[in-house]
Image: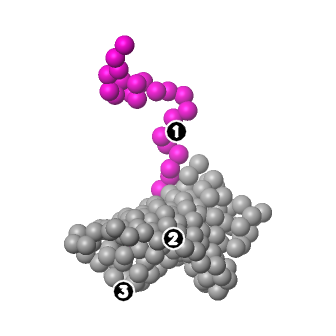
Amino acid sequence: MSLTPGIIASSLTGHLITNNFFLISQQTPSSATSITFSSIPNTYKSLQLRYSSTISGSAGYRINFNGDSTNGHYAQHWFYSAGSSASAGSSANTYTTGTVGLGVSTYQNVGIVDIVDYANTSKNKTLKWFAGGNNNTSGGDIELDSGLWISTSAINSLTFSGGTFTGTFSLYGVS
């Protein structure tokens, strides 16, 4: 028996969910130092932030929730690889969560941030962040982060910051 590529995938049914991402807001800043998504509805299971952006003047992107930049309210772990070197680390008791990143100002950095159970008021908030960039001359970078906001408050706004950036930032609700 031989398989023809595409036949199996095109005939799958059942548990495929293709319509569970709902655009809440999209912003396209030019030379911004921060953007804020506010009035986030509490009607979804999770949030997903997707971005494609250039950045200068910083070594990475940062996220704060509900305007909270209190030192000690965030923690994170990261695995980072640039070119042929890699590193891993963590930071606790910080004022934000974010990526280390190259901070590339000439080529796009891309990332996806998943914020799990953002409206649940009985637990702290967690996120995972997958990002990468290319500086075209000395390699690129890739990073996988996990973050924690030590708060049981529902997330109703998030501020994305770090250097000066230009690009597209889209916030989705995930059912």
**Is mark 2 in CB contact (under 8 Å) with mark 3?**
no
Question: Which region of the structure is painted magenta?
Answer: 1-29
> Front-most of 136 and 120?
136
At 61% across and 82% down in the image, what residue appears?
94
Type of amino acid under label 2: Ala
Quarter of image, res 108: bottom left
Label 2 vs 1, first from the N-terminus = 1
- If you read the primary sequence from the N terminus, does the residue marked by circle 2 or circle 3 appear first? 3
**Magenta span includes 143:** no
Is residue 121 rendered to the left or right of residue 133? right
Residue 25 visible? The answer is no
Quadrant of the rendered image containing residue 53: bottom left
The amino acid marked with disc number 3 is Gly
Q: Nearer the viewer, mark 2 or mark 3?
A: 2
User: Spatial distance from mark 1 to mark 3, Cα to Cα?
Assistant: 40 Å
Residue in the foreground of this view, choosing between 158 and 40: 158
Q: Closest to the observer: 32 or 111?
A: 111
Q: Residues within 10 Å of mark 3 (few under 14, many from 20)?
A: few
Q: Which residue is mark 3?
A: 57
> Which of these two is toward me, 144 or 67?
144
Name the residue furthest left. 137
Mark 1 lies on residue: 17
